[in-house]
Amino acid sequence: MEIVTSEFFQRALIGGLLIGVTAPLMGIFLVLRRLSMIGDTLSHVSIAGVALGFLIGVYPVAVGLVFAVAASFAIEKLRKAYKSYAELSIAIIMSGGVALASILFTMGKGFNVNVTGYLFGSIYTLSNIDLITIAVVTVVVLVAIRLQVKELFLLTFDEDAAAVSGLPVRFYNVMISVLTALVISASIKIVGALLVSALLTIPAACSLIIARSFRQSIITVVIIGEIAVICGLMIAGIWNLAPGGTIVLLLIVILLGLLLFKRGIRTGS
C-alpha cells in the first residue's frame, strides 16, 4: 500500500477524479443523442495532434486539444451537410485522424514510445501542467453545463422542438462537440486514446439501466465514473496493472453487474 502515499499516485488520483466527473457527464449527452462514436473519433484526431506536438517540440496535450476542437467543428459542419446520414461525419473525421496520425508516426519514429503512453494511458506520469490542464477543462465543462442544463436537456431529447422554440441549436451542438473535445484531450493521458470512449459511454450505459430521470442520470454517471476511477487506480497500483485498462474493465464489470441485477429483479417479479 506504499504506492498510495507516493506523489505520482496522488497526482494520478487527482487527475482521475477530475476526469471521472467530466467524461461521464459529457458521455450522457452523447449517448442520449446517439453520438457515442464521437469519442473514438475525437480521440484518434487528438493522437494525431499529440504526434505533431512531439514532432515540433510543443506540449503534446495542447496540440491534441487544438486538433480535437478543430475536428469537433468539422464534425458539426459535415453533420449539417449530411443531415440524413449524420454518422458519416464521424466516420470521415475518424478516417482522416487515423491517416494523419499514421503519417506523423512515420515522420517521427523517435517519439513513438512516448506516444504509446497516450494510446493506452499513462496516468502515473501526469505532470503539474497536465493536472492544471485537466482542472481548467473540468471547470469549463462544469460551468458550461450548469449554466445551460435546461437548454442542453431540450436539445438532447428533441432537437426539432428546441429549434422551433427559438433555441440556437447550431450553437449548442457546437458547444457539446467542443466540450467533448476538451474532455477527450484531457483524458487521453489518463486512460489512453484507445480507451477514452469507454469512460464516456459505459457510465452512461449504466445510468440507462438504473436512472429514472435525466437528473438521476447525471448523478449516476458521475458516481459510477468516480467509483471506477478510484477502485481501478487502487487495484492497478496494488497489483501492478495497467491503470487505464483496469478502469475500463471495472466499468464493464459494473455494467454487467447492473444488467444481471436488473434481470434478476425481472425474473423474481
Image (cartoon, rainbow, N blue to C red):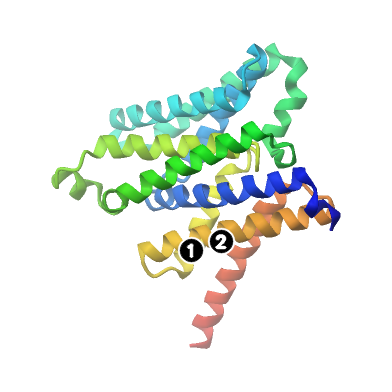
Q: State the image coordinates of residue 149 (x, y, percent, origin top left).
A: 32, 52
Q: Residue 80 sits in which quadrant?
A: top left
Q: Are marks 1 and 2 in contact (CB under 8 Å)?
A: yes
Circle 2 residue: 224
Asked if residue 193 shows in the view, the reply is: no
Asked if residue 255 shows in the view, the reply is: yes
Task: Tell me, for residue 220, which label it has, or none.
Answer: 1
Which residue is found at the position 49% from the left and 81% from the top? 266
Residue 69 lies left or right of residue 115; in this view the side is: left
Q: Residue 132 sits in which quadrant?
A: top right
Q: State the image coordinates of residue 211 (x, y, percent, origin top left).
A: 43, 68
Which residue is found at the position 59% from the left and 57% from the top? 226
Q: State the SS at label 1.
A: helix
Disc 1 residue type (three-letter): Thr
Disc 2 residue type (three-letter): Ile
Q: State the image coordinates of residue 84 (x, y, percent, origin top left).
A: 29, 37
Which residue is found at the position 72% from the left and 48% from the top? 10
Q: State the image coordinates of residue 163 (x, y, percent, origin top left).
A: 18, 43
Task: Tell me, for residue 205, which label it has, or none.
Answer: none
- Residue 154 in the image: above or below residue 89: below
- Residue 235 in the image: above or below residue 74: below
Which residue is found at the position 70% from the left and 15% from the top? 106
Q: Residues within 10 Å of mark 2 (few under 14, many from 20)?
A: many
- Residue 267 in the image: above or below residue 111: below
- Residue 10 in the image: above or below residue 70: below
Q: State the SS at label 2.
A: helix
Q: Residues within 10 Å of mark 1 (few under 14, many from 20)?
A: many
Nearer to us in this view, 253 or 55: 55
Nearer to us in this view, 81 or 255: 255
